[in-house]
Image (cartoon, coloured by chain):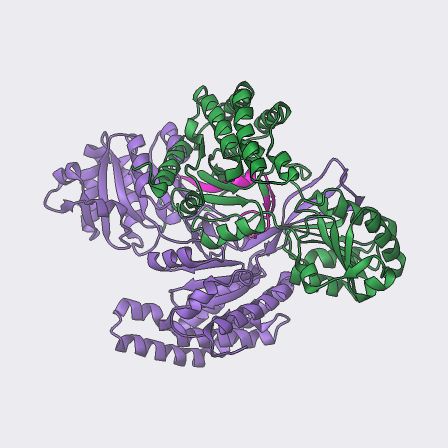
Chain colours: A purple, B green
Amino acid sequence: MNSTDPEQSVLAAATRARQAAAELATAPRTAKDAALHAMAAGLMADSGRILAANRTDVDAARAAGSPETMLDRLSLTEQRIQAMADGLREVAALPDPVGTVVRGSTLPNGLELRQLRVPFGVVGVIYEGRPNVTVDVAGLCLKSGNAALLRGSSSAAASNEAIVAALRVALTTSELPADAVTLVPGNGREPAKHLMRARGLVDVLIPRGGAELIQTVVAESTVPVIETGVGNCHVYVDAEADPAMALTILVNSKVSRPSVCNAAETLLVHRAIAPDFLPAALVALTEHGVVVHGDDRVRAYRPESVGPATEADWATEYLGLEIAVKIVESLDEAVAHIRRYGSGHTEAIVTGSQTAARRFAGAVDAASIMVNASTRFTDGAEFGFGAEIGISTQKLHARGPMGLAELTTTKYVVTGDGHVRP
Amino acid sequence: MNSTDPEQSVLAAATRARQAAAELATAPRTAKDAALHAMAAGLMADSGRILAANRTDVDAARAAGSPETMLDRLSLTEQRIQAMADGLREVAALPDPVGTVVRGSTLPNGLELRQLRVPFGVVGVIYEGRPNVTVDVAGLCLKSGNAALLRGSSSAAASNEAIVAALRVALTTSELPADAVTLVPGNGREPAKHLMRARGLVDVLIPRGGAELIQTVVAESTVPVIETGVGNCHVYVDAEADPAMALTILVNSKVSRPSVCNAAETLLVHRAIAPDFLPAALVALTEHGVVVHGDDRVRAYRPESVGPATEADWATEYLGLEIAVKIVESLDEAVAHIRRYGSGHTEAIVTGSQTAARRFAGAVDAASIMVNASTRFTDGAEFGFGAEIGISTQKLHARGPMGLAELTTTKYVVTGDGHVRP
């Protein structure tokens, strides 16, 4: 094993993670929860070293000219480390998904069939986020019995190394193997590529980050991938909506946190309600600092503040204070527009009509449909999952917010007393 | 759209399937069941044309020197068409998975959360099997609300075309679109490659066939894949097994149908029971015509009939009357052997010990664990699913026999009365 060969280093790390996963798979909840508490304590005990490492990342990012918002996201404080440790303790308090019986029956021949939740094994995560993602992912993987193989962004490399070092030291004091949490070694883009090709060693790969990262992983990975996060979400205001409710939902969906994937990016308004709804909506959006791109009929309401919407606007996830607005002739046109431009994340309808709600919920193909509720509710914590490793926008395995159960696969255990097949 | 360009032809077919899928997604069960009955009647009505097309396939295969077993698998008869039609009617009788509430609750803020089963959309299937696979897959996809995009083997091309033509004519008499069942057009290997790259048009790709086909699809597809079928299954006879029960299970697992993926390929015997079990087992295997490859200790029992087992034997899925046999020191050694060589399909333990059964079921990582039962029970029909589109040996989405529920994804429908996120 030549540790200077990037591929060999990555495969060696994946192999160690795989060995750890075999131990984790049968670890009882008590051992996992104790390890999570030890990890939380370890973070706090090592906070000085973690903060020092983080300063080198922040200084390097500042020297490279990163914007203040990025520096803020990268920066750790004693308080943020405390929040990470608290997060681990919260995960410890959640129920263990492993061993849950998903389906069970006694077959006509007397065989007892049980389908149980079991861990995946090794979960690879490639992410661009803040250093706290390292702790979140490690905690969720460990609780669900998986070994975490982590590849963070190079801008947070020193922080992530210090954090993982602290977690691994804590694990050595627990009953679980330190290799339950492993950083993918090496610099540059090579290691991530080898991780994507480690089929057989890595059971699933979850990219967390921008559209470009996710597309690269989807295109290059031979390891099964769970796609996350891109959200070109729509709010459709139906002919039979209550305009006041629609306005509240629109503003919350767009402006409560515009940088996240469950924020609304396009407003579709039924022609019949436009006169009663749009003028106030456009004023409210402008007052909240939202730049509005509208079709011709929308612009006619407020030509002074609404710019023209282009084809690109319908397809864009702004992730900021911008919105595209279109008047549609019917619910069917709204559904067709969403089918064409939506990313399958969250689509909302505001309507007083039960029929319209049913038709929209049935015809729109997305992870979450909101009926008279803000798009911002698509979230693991809001859904009551206690924690979330990401929001899947694909259809295979998991769709929508992914909690601990979504980090498991299943196993059938079939018990007989000498049964053979006729 | 240039129909002579293979890529454009495939993408056009996928686009038509996608449009059909949007209709199928909201089709009620009554419409789907009626369409399945129409398809069954259509097959019978068109049996003359289907048999004639099949004869051209069989003649071509015979001229190309295909072995008799392959010719038999390719050949259709009036009776086999009847069986295909009966299969469609059986699928019609199964419950509709679409709309099943997988998870539901009222959140603390009063939002009503429902996670419902919904169809994938377009299911691509690449298969090498007999022409009846075309009908099986079309029926299961339609019942689960999916459009089927089918790519069979070139040796059955005329048969598949005649079958799909009959099914599509039948669909035109139903409420559902004919494009619910679509053949991928074109000759040679090109069309399958374009199918594998049709991400965004095809929601999931299921390869059914030999290991080579499956590996190609896994390596080349950007469409999410469900891997099926390879089974290097083990029977482990524990120290505390009843030798007579172990012998019955071994023989059934190995010889009842050796060509299928749930047949046993390796026998592992605990050292302590070997003297009481192996002599009779080796005789029984030989009497059933099974060629035995054993390690040195196994060979010592019957050197005249047991050849040496090589590294390749442990890794081989024989799919025929051959078996590799090894004596292990412990249950842990059996688990380690299975971890190294198993394909994650089905692993059986024969034991009277509850402790051993629990340890084996917990530690072995496979789709199915059989405790005192034949490996041959891993099967959708045996598990009571009514039908099966394949046996998944991967961990993402579905693991083990895949019935109608496994051909669906889910959608959250969240209903409020003006809820916004604080």
Residue B410 lies in the magenta-colored region: yes
Percent of width and height locating residue A133: 43, 65
Percent of width and height locating residue A5: 47, 76
Q: Residue furthest right?
A: B276
Residue range highlighted in magenta: B391-418
Left/right placement of residue A32 relative to residue A84 reads right
Q: Nearer the viewer, residue B189 or A253?
A: B189
Q: Nearer the viewer, residue B390 or B360?
A: B390
Left/right placement of residue A53 relative to residue A285 reads right
To which quarter of the image does residue B323 belong? bottom right
Percent of width and height locating residue B279: 88, 56
Residue A84 lies in the magenta-colored region: no
On screen, residue A302 above or below A14: above
On screen, residue B165 above or below B193: above
Q: Nearer the viewer, residue A289 or B362?
A: B362
Percent of width and height locating residue A77: 38, 74
Q: Is residue B103 visible?
A: no
Q: In the rendered view of the protein, which quadrant contains the N terminus of chain B?
A: top left
- Disc tally is 0
